[in-house]
């Protein structure tokens, strides 16, 4: 009897407990695992995720890192502003050419490396593609290569000698650090890939606005080659400019001011643009796309009045960062339409003065009424698209290359004609096409678009950044090593003890 | 502790079950009388109970210990009982006219320490338990009257550290058993009536709890394998008693108030400080001398913000009892608590309804050796909770944080309401339309706290939860039982909220359109367990217990939610998603949550218990666990433990020991267990979704759904393992009147899950790996004493524990990681973990006073290349490298205490009872994050009055400046304060009405009481609250303006029928 009971119990126990191996394997139902075969939909989703990085710079990684503002803070056009010196203190240090390895716009490092990783992932997905039409696949690949080059070029400009990798990282999940010249070669290889073989259309149709075009790749290549002062590539780049010009698909907008408004988005002058949507960005959500914070960030605090330069009352208040220096408006000639479109001037008392107040503000991306019509967190959800490449830059690059002695195999207007075209649109008379004038023209045309500092560096004119302006708490010294920011301390720390992968700090920062 | 309670219970039930109204009639008086005395001392015992069994007749002894009963002729069994003594019964036959005297000597109760202790999958007499287990009984809980059951553990047992996260009603507590065992989730495992309950214990009504056992060492927790590493809390709910009936009603009502205000600058002081700040930075002062002299106190924002006399109400009814073959316990509970911040605006409250039914039934019972009995039972609870809460602890514009930091010079209501409304038509007003003051420039997220209370927004949480367990137990053979159970934990919870158009401040406190949102979650878990138990004794000295079992569980979670905008009408009652009018294109990307997840666990376990005549004890446990949370290469794990005990006083050579020495017992154990509390799918790399991008412009605009890999995969990912040794000593003296328990433990957690700290440039989340090591060692002491001084009976129990935590290896190359930062607030990183240090610790610069003179500043600047001025902080160059930089930051404090202690004192005297519960910590620090470096205009704590204003005016608090070239308010030891405290957590005075009075009202027992919580707190810390743990698990001791715990005074009654 006893035996029988125990036997039957054991049977019962086993029956109760027959959990096969599958019981412990749970499948996620709301997302797929990474690295598998990729359908066209999966590749496009990976690519959209890669484009999304473009939306991150104004606020992500819990930092305000607008790429144009980060670029201009070191220029001679603006000050840091904000609540006081300590408000976003790392930006103050940046503007004083005094970034340290612990206080710097580190968000950009994280954001653009995420971009690099997402672009790599998209390219891997393209290699694992199943059932995707070849032309379609080539186009997707070219877009991914363009984006990889775009993200890398910012890392290269800000930090120079950076780690770089293509594909997945294997244990210990670290990458080799290259010097800036090697990084330059990687960027150019990606751009050459994107440009060669007409994988991309020169211009996008309205349906595909926002996607990378061949012209965008050519423009990036031009910027990168110029920043590298790589004269060996100037002819080739000039050919690219000629191709854009001769395509006839782009043209300057008649009204310079209209470029920066809602209706000026994806205009005929726009070659590449980041498509911000006033929707879902939120505080505390470190990595979300949608809108931009930049307009709020750079507009005067608690603004009530109208702009004295344009007479417009469409502007609304913000946090008071990036005030334009009081003498900056003087770079414009009388009647230059670009002045009221680039700079706002508000009367004292119509807004709350904050740190380094000058009364002048950046206008192109200034906060405008009803541009942040978002369901929540309007501060972060302005719809202003970021204009990355404009046709005006194509013209001025083509002019500059010619003034530098480059020649094109294609027909191209002269440097004088190109500069005249840009100036004519601005409503000012022609001036002599020489390098000196071209430099000033670029400053006037692209004020607040994040080009000036890089221009000064590549022209070797950055010594003018050494200044002492005590009335605006602004004292700084340029030294050539400051071309690059220090590599974030935390990143160096993480590679310590990893031999070949140990990150080396940029020169001048040890 | 437990036995007297059981005893009292039986006593009351004995009376209750037979009714108390009947009174025996007698024509001719027969009496039984006598004196009741203490057997040992011979002293008489006033107040002892004399009951005639199976009748309604009874009495108590008078002040001389004498009793007298009048009875009809017949044969009776009479029971004499008294608290702290063993019950005595005698039989007596009364002939007509008999007057019999019976004097009874009661023996003091001695074996209260042989109570039954609940262990995993069974119970054991305390005398043979070889593991470190602490118990909390129903009467401990009754005394403390916690809202949440975790709070019943606070200060009650050595080695258990409970820190309430905030004073918000219903807020949780951080429970740590034997320290922070891991850098990951170190919450203990909670088992309620055999059912593992993962997500929140607030469904439990503390009044339903019979006992709580805390399993602390590996020997006791190993039977829970991969879930036992952080300790196990076993909760047993009440059940009825056979052949009994009892109806209890308990109620209390009280008022809560803040027990402290934090001293901040008043209007005059604020103006002085602000002007000085401006002058120090070379700017013109803001306020004129006249403004300053007439400013006075200004607005006391704390006074304006607190909800004084916030009510708290509890009702509890229970019905329990049983027949010959069944028991039942039914209860209904209701609790409602309003918060002291926002409670008066429905923004901070907690309301809960509980229903419970516990019952068992012998469905089959025969008198034979095998298959003799089948018992089935159920324990089922349904709970509904509703709550709302304000942000409890943040430097970024919480209500109380704003009350501390908001400008005291401006009034609550605007002086120029028309102007405000003109500029901000949506400016917040009160119910009468009075417009609140808006913040002046420079206050960022900090807004008018009273206006924040009136902000037209709220978010309500709700939960419905059913936890139920059914079981059948079969007696298969002498000593052999089989128990099978099936349990479920089904919870529905969600949030409903709205925000209407309003304006309070430019940063964070405004809405340009109305929003409504809602989400619903459904979590379901089932658990099946089958356990065989065999109990035998050979020659009466070899006692053997064998247990083997199996367990499997699965948890599934579904979530859905949505948001809509532009409500047709701004009415809180109509704030539902359907009432929004947002366009379809917005609806298609509603901020909804969605998803479905599942998690499984399968286990086999067994245990062998052996003792030789209760003198030598040995126990071995083995458990095998398989979890879906781990990588395909490492699904299963084996967890063993061994423990042994030696009761010295059972040895023959100890037979002649002195009378006062009852027991000396040594215990020792070793075991290994695990922690599987990591996110699902940690071993793989899923694609993160929602990374969308919009292509096309104008009418062509369309969203493309975007994805990217979330992290790098690690298929070898496994549980964390914890090994622990424990050495213990139990001693009892004076027939149990004094007892002492000591434990020493050393616990090492290995293979802690850690995100491998790869550089950020990898661009994706790092893989998880099993790489870290943590060690905790500690000492625990529990001492209890009871006895009487005359007719005052007292009970004292005290416990204390010392804990030393060391993070041996973070698991990364750097050996360190930052856990908390406040960059925007100008503080930077301030909580860190680092190899060889306590985990976590406060991190920052050490300071060496204030630079007093220009010469000192010049020297400092020359030496370190700094830009400091007199009045700035002198930071210490720890590494002597000639610069003050990030490398000079060190440990400046820690949030976890070295010592924690609790002291319970209770006494009874002639119907009066009194109890006090003290609790405290020693050796912990507070990081007082009450100043933000980035808001010069904010108000500050009063200690800023003592700032540096010239040579030798202060060596502790720097000058005021907004430019702050020296960054005086970066994280440093000037933020650190001593957080040690002693708190009179609870004091209660009760009175039990004499029986002869209340019986006339058909009441068996009536006790009324008054109780006070947080009556007294001794601490050096000048903030609201030394107990702060709101936020992530590394936030213990960080005060960002925490929602303080209230002082509550309540009155109540316990009524038994």
Image: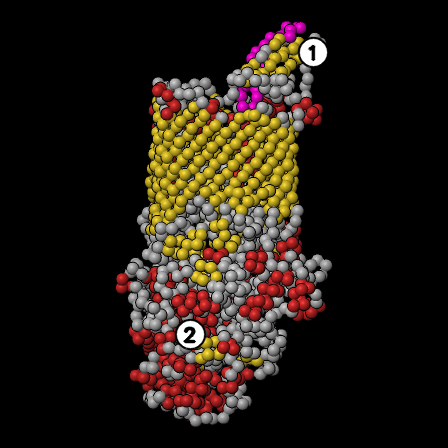
| Mark number displayed over residue B18 | none
Tell me which segment is drawn in magenta: B75-99
Magenta-drawn stretch, dominant element (helix, strand or loop): strand
- Residue A226: image location, x then y, percent: 36, 81
Q: Nearer the viewer, residue B609 or B632?
A: B609
- Residue A486: image location, x then y, percent: 37, 69
Up/down of B322 relative to B79, above or below: below
Please count the marks in the image. Answer: 2
- Magenta-colored stretch includes residue B97: yes
In this view of the protein, can residue B41 be seen by the observer?
yes
**Does the residue at mark 1 contact the one at mark 2 (Cβ under 8 Å)?**
no
**B29 sits left or right of B184 in the view:** right
Residue appearing at x 62%, y 16% in the figure = B66
Q: Chain of mark 1?
A: B
Q: In this figure, which residue is indicated by the disc labeled 2?
A: A97
Assess disc 1: are there few (<14), some (14-19) or many (≥20) residues with their C-alpha within 10 Å of its C-alpha. Answer: few
Q: In this figure, which residue is indicated by the disc labeled 1?
A: B26
In this view of the protein, can residue B752 be seen by the observer?
no
Kindly state the secondary structure of the residue where label 1 is placed: loop
Kindly state the secondary structure of the residue where label 2 is placed: loop
Residue appearing at x 61%, y 69% in the figure = B286
**Quarter placement of the C terminus of chain B:** top right
Residue appearing at x 29%, y 66% in the figure = A176
Up/down of B272 relative to B108, above or below: below
Q: Chain of mark 2?
A: A
- Magenta-colored stretch includes residue B839: no
**Res B415 → quadrant:** bottom right
User: Given this view, does label 1 or label 2 mark the residue nearer the observer?
Assistant: 2
Assess disc 2: are there few (<14), some (14-19) or many (≥20) residues with their C-alpha within 10 Å of its C-alpha. Answer: many
**Res A160 → quadrant:** bottom left
């Amino acid at each position: 009897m006893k035996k029988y009971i125990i036997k039957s119990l054991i049977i019962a126990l086993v029956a109760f407990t027959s959990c096969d191996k599958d019981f412990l394997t749970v499948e996620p139902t709301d997302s797929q695992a990474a690295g598998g075969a990729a359908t066209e939909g999966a590749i496009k989703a990976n690519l959209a995720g890669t484009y999304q990085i473009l939306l991150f710079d104004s606020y992500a990684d819990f930092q305000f890192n607008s790429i144009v503002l980060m670029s201009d803070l070191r220029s001679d056009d603006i000050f840091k502003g904000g609540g006081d010196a300590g408000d976003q203190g790392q930006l103050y240090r940046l503007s004083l050419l005094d970034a340290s390895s612990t206080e710097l716009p580190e968000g950009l490092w994280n954001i653009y490396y995420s971009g690099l990783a997402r672009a790599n992932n998209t390219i891997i997905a393209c290699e694992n593609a199943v059932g995707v039409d070849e032309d379609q696949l080539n186009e997707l690949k070219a877009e991914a290569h363009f984006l990889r080059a775009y993200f890398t070029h910012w890392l290269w400009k800000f930090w120079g000698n950076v780690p770089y990798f293509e594909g997945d990282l294997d244990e210990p999940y670290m990458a080799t650090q290259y010097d800036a010249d090697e990084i330059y070669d990687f960027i150019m290889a990606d751009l050459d890939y994107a440009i060669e073989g007409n994988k991309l259309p020169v211009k996008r149709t309205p349906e595909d606005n926002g996607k990378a075009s061949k012209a965008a790749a050519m423009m990036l290549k031009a910027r990168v080659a110029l920043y590298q002062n790589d004269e060996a590539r100037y002819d080739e780049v000039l050919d690219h400019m000629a191709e854009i010009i001769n395509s006839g698909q782009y043209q300057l907008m008649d009204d310079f001011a209209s470029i920066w408004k809602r209706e000026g988005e994806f205009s005929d002058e726009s070659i590449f643009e980041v498509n911000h949507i006033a929707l879902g960005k939120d505080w505390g959500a470190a990595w979300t796309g949608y809108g931009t914070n930049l307009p709020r960030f750079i507009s005067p605090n608690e603004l009530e009045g109208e702009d004295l330069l344009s007479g417009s009352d469409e502007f609304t208040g913000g946090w008071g960062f990036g005030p334009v220096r009081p003498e900056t408006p003087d770079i414009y000639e009388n009647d230059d339409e670009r002045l009221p479109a680039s700079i706002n001037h508000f009367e004292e008392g119509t807004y709350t003065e904050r740190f380094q107040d000058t009364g002048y503000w950046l206008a192109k991306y200034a906060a405008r009424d009803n541009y942040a019509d978002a369901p929540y967190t309007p501060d972060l959800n302005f719809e202003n698209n970021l204009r990355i490449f404009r046709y005006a830059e194509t013209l001025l690059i083509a002019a500059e290359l010619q003034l530098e002695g480059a020649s094109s195999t294609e027909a191209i207007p002269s440097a004088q004609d190109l500069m005249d075209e840009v100036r004519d649109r601005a409503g000012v008379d022609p001036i002599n096409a020489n390098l000196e004038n071209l430099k000033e023209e670029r400053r006037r045309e692209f004020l607040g678009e994040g080009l000036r500092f890089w221009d000064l560096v590549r022209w070797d004119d950055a010594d003018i950044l050494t200044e002492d302006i005590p009335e605006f708490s602004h004292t700084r010294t340029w030294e050539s090593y400051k071309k690059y920011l220090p590599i974030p301390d935390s990143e160096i720390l993480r590679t310590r003890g990893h031999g070949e992968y140990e990150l080396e700090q940029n020169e001048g920062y040890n | 502790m437990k036995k007297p309670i059981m005893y009292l219970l039986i006593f009351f039930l004995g009376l209750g079950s037979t009714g108390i109204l009947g009174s025996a009639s007698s024509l001719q008086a027969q009496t039984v009388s006598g004196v009741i005395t203490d057997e040992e001392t011979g002293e008489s015992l006033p107040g002892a109970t004399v009951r005639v069994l199976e009748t309604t007749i009874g009495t108590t002894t008078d002040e001389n210990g004498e009793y007298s009963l009048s009875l009809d002729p017949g044969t009776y069994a009479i029971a004499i009982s008294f608290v702290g003594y063993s019950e005595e019964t005698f039989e007596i036959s009364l002939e007509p006219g008999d007057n019999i005297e019976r004097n009874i000597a009661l023996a003091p109760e001695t074996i209260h320490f042989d109570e039954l202790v609940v262990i995993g999958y069974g119970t054991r007499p305390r005398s043979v338990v070889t593991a470190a287990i602490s118990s909390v009984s129903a009467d401990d809980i009754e005394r403390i009257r916690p809202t949440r059951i975790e709070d019943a553990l606070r200060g009650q047992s050595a080695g258990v550290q409970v820190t309430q996260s905030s004073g918000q009603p219903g807020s949780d507590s951080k429970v740590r058993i034997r320290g922070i065992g891991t850098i990951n989730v170190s919450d203990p495992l909670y088992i309620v009536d055999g059912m593992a309950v993962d997500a929140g214990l607030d469904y439990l009504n503390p009044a339903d709890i019979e006992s709580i056992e805390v399993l602390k060492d590996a020997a006791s927790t190993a039977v829970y394998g991969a879930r036992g590493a952080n300790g196990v809390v076993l909760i047993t709910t009440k059940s009825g008693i056979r052949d009994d009936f009892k109806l209890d009603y308990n109620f209390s009502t009280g008022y809560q108030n803040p027990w402290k205000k934090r001293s901040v600058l008043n209007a005059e002081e604020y103006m002085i400080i602000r002007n000085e700040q401006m002058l120090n930075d070379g700017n013109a002062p803001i306020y004129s001398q006249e403004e300053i002299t007439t400013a006075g106190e200004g607005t006391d924002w704390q006074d304006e913000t607190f909800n004084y006399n916030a009510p708290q109400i509890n009702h509890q009814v229970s019905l329990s009892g049983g027949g010959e073959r069944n028991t039942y316990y039914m209860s209904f509970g209701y609790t409602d608590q309003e918060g002291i911040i926002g409670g008066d605006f429905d923004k901070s409250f907690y309301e809960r309804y509980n229903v419970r039914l516990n019952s068992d039934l012998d469905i089959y019972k025969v008198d034979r050796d095998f298959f003799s009995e089948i018992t089935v039972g159920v324990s089922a609870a349904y709970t509904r909770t509703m709550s709302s809460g304000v942000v409890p602890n943040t430097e970024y514009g919480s209500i109380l944080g704003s009350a501390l930091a908001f400008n005291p010079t401006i009034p609550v209501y605007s002086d120029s309401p028309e102007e405000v409304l003109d500029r901000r038509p949506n400016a917040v007003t009160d119910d009468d339309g009075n417009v609140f003051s808006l913040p002046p420039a420079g206050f960022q997220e900090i807004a008018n706290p009273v206006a924040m209370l009136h902000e037209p927004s709220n978010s309500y949480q709700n939960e419905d939860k059913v936890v139920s367990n059914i079981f059948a137990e079969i007696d298969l053979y002498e000593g052999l039982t089989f128990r099978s159970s099936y349990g479920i934990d089904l919870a529905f919870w969600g949030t409903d909220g709205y925000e209407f158009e309003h304006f309070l401040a430019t940063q964070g406190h405004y809405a340009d359109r109305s929003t409504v949102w809602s989400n619903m979650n459904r979590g379901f878990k089932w658990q099946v367990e089958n356990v065989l138990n065999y109990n035998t004794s050979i020659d009466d000295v070899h006692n053997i217990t064998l247990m083997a079992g199996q367990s499997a569980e699965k948890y599934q979670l579904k979530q859905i939610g949505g948001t809509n905008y532009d409500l047709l009408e701004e009415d809180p009652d109509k704030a539902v998603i359907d009432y929004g009018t947002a366009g379809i294109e917005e609806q298609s990307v509603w901020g909804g949550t969605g998803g479905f997840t599942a998690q499984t666990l399968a286990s086999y376990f067994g245990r062998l218990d052996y003792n030789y005549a209760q003198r030598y004890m040995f126990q071995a446990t083995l458990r095998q666990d398989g979890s879906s949370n781990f990588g395909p290469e490492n699904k299963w794990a084996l967890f063993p433990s061994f423990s042994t005990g030696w009761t010295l006083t059972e040895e023959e050579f100890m037979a002649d020991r002195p009378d006062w020495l009852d027991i000396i017992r040594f215990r020792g154990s070793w075991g290994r267990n695990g922690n599987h509390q990591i996110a699902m799918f940690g071993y793989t790399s899923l694609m993160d979704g929602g990374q969308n991008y919009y292509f096309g412009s104008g009418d062509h605009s369309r969203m493309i759904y975007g994805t990217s890999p979330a992290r790098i995969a690690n298929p070898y990912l496994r549980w964390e393992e914890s090994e622990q040794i424990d050495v213990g000593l139990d001693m009892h003296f004076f027939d149990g009147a004094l007892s002492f328990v000591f434990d020493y433990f050393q616990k090492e957690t290995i293979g802690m899950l850690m995100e491998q700290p790869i550089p950020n440039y990898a661009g994706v989340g790092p893989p998880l790996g099993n790489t870290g090591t943590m060690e905790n060692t500690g000492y625990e002491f529990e001492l209890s004493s009871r006895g009487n001084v005359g007719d005052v009976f007292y009970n004292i129990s005290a416990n204390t524990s010392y804990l030393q935590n060391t993070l041996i290896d973070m698991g990364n190359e750097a050996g360190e990681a930052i856990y908390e930062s406040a960059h925007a607030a100008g503080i930077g990183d301030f909580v860190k973990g680092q190899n060889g240090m306590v985990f976590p610790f406060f991190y920052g610069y050490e300071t060496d006073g204030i630079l007093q003179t220009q010469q000192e500043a010049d020297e400092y600047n020359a030496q370190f290349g700094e830009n400091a001025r007199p009045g700035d902080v002198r930071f210490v160059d720890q590494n002597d490298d000639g610069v003050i930089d990030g490398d000079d930051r060190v440990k400046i404090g820690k949030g976890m205490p070295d010592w924690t202690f609790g002291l319970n004192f209770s006494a009874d005297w002639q119907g009066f009872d009194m109890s006090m519960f003290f609790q405290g910590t020693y050796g912990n620090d507070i990081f007082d994050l009450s100043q933000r470096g980035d808001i010069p205009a904010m108000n500050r704590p009063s200690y800023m009055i003592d700032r540096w204003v010239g040579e030798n005016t202060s060596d502790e608090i720097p000058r005021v400046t907004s430019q702050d070239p020296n960054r005086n308010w970066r994280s440093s030891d000037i933020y650190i304060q001593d957080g040690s405290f002693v708190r009179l957590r609870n004091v209660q005075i009760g009175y039990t009405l004499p029986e002869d009075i209340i019986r006339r009202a058909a009441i068996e027992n009536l006790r009324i009481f008054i109780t006070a919580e947080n009556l007294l707190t001794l601490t050096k810390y000048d903030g609201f609250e030394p107990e702060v743990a709101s936020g992530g698990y590394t936030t213990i001791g960080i005060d960002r303006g925490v929602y303080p715990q209230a002082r509550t005074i309540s009155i109540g009654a316990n009524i038994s029928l």
